[in-house]
Image (tube, rainbow, N blue to C red):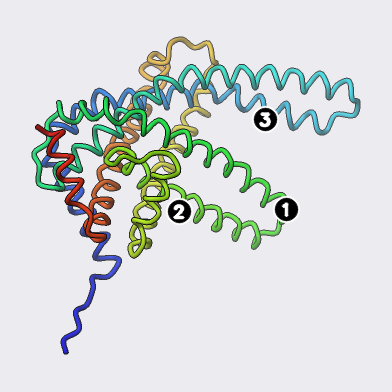
Amino acid sequence: MIEVKRPGSSTRITTTLLDSFMILFRNKHILLPIFAFIAIPLAALHLSLTLTSFRLKNHVFRLEALANVVHTRFEARQIWQESREDAVSLLHLKFRYFVPSFILSCMASITVITSTSFSHQGINPSLKSSFVSVKSSWMRVTATSIIVYGLLFLYSPIPMFLSALVGYTPTLQYLITIFCLGVEVYVMAITGLGFVVSVLEERYGFDAIKEGTALMKGRRITGLALAGVFVFLSSFIGHGMEKLAKELDMDVSSGSWWRSVVVAGGWDGWKLVCMYGAEVVLSYVVITVFYCECRKRHGSSDAIVSDEESLAI
């Protein structure tokens, strides 16, 4: 009896990445306009927020640290009041950027996911069909986004809490860092698949994330490895933006968001913007290819093909 060997995890990852790059070049007439007119403005908004909020955010942190070491309650109360006012200003600033960033992010995810799914199933996508899908999917994507933001908000204080709990022992701090990184990669993997499910299927919110988790069964190592790559890329680009913000030390009132990127950011800023935009497009292409492979593995891709054909016509 001949034993059929299944491809290893490294082979599967390589296949997923190769298929993703093939689709990337095959759909360049769709993905390049999405990159230029959606991903680049989204990345520019993200960089502008990083540059303009850096000084205010650091000031809030310094005030909070100072309030914990002053000797009198009166001084502490005055410092806490100033800290709260600056924190409110920081929230207002972030909200101003949130609405356009969220709209562009939804458009980028839906258009890239739809065109990639069409291409992977052998359907010729068009720019029009990709944007038509925005109208039918944006509510599901919005609902799923709310759940994802909620999960990330609940997770955000956990690393600081664990670090404070174990103290400053180097070994324990290292283990906490590894653990939190693993949790972050896992959350990004299942929420990424959840986004794809919410775009391509009639599911949203926890239902989409639950379906994404189920689809990873049998290919968790591949999914976690792919998510880990994009977590690393995002962290690398984010670190570059923070470094640039520290060098420029801009004030909130430095002008429009576009001026803060074009004038203040300079060539280094534009390199980060292009890298961020490319990472957004590439990540959605790869996770969609991974989703299609998982769907095929579970033997339930026929219904999706018929739905996509009706959209592509």
Q: Residue at x 32, y 44 (%)?
A: 197
Q: Are marks 3 and 2 in contact (CB under 8 Å)?
A: no
Residue 10: % across, % down = 28, 65
Separation of marks 3 and 2 at Cα, in angstroms: 29 Å
Quadrant for the C terminus, please. top left
Mark 1 or mark 2, which has the lower sequence index? 1
Separation of marks 1 and 2 at Cα, in angstroms: 23 Å
Q: Residue at x 42, y 26 (%)?
A: 47
Q: Which residue is mark 3?
A: 61
At mark 3, the secondary structure is helix
Instruction: Look at discs 1 and 2 and give the one toward the viewer.
Output: 2
In this picture, residue 148 sits left or right of residue 214 = right
Q: Quadrant of residue 41?
A: top left
Q: Which residue is mark 1?
A: 165
Separation of marks 3 and 1 at Cα, in angstroms: 20 Å
Quadrant for the N terminus, please. bottom left
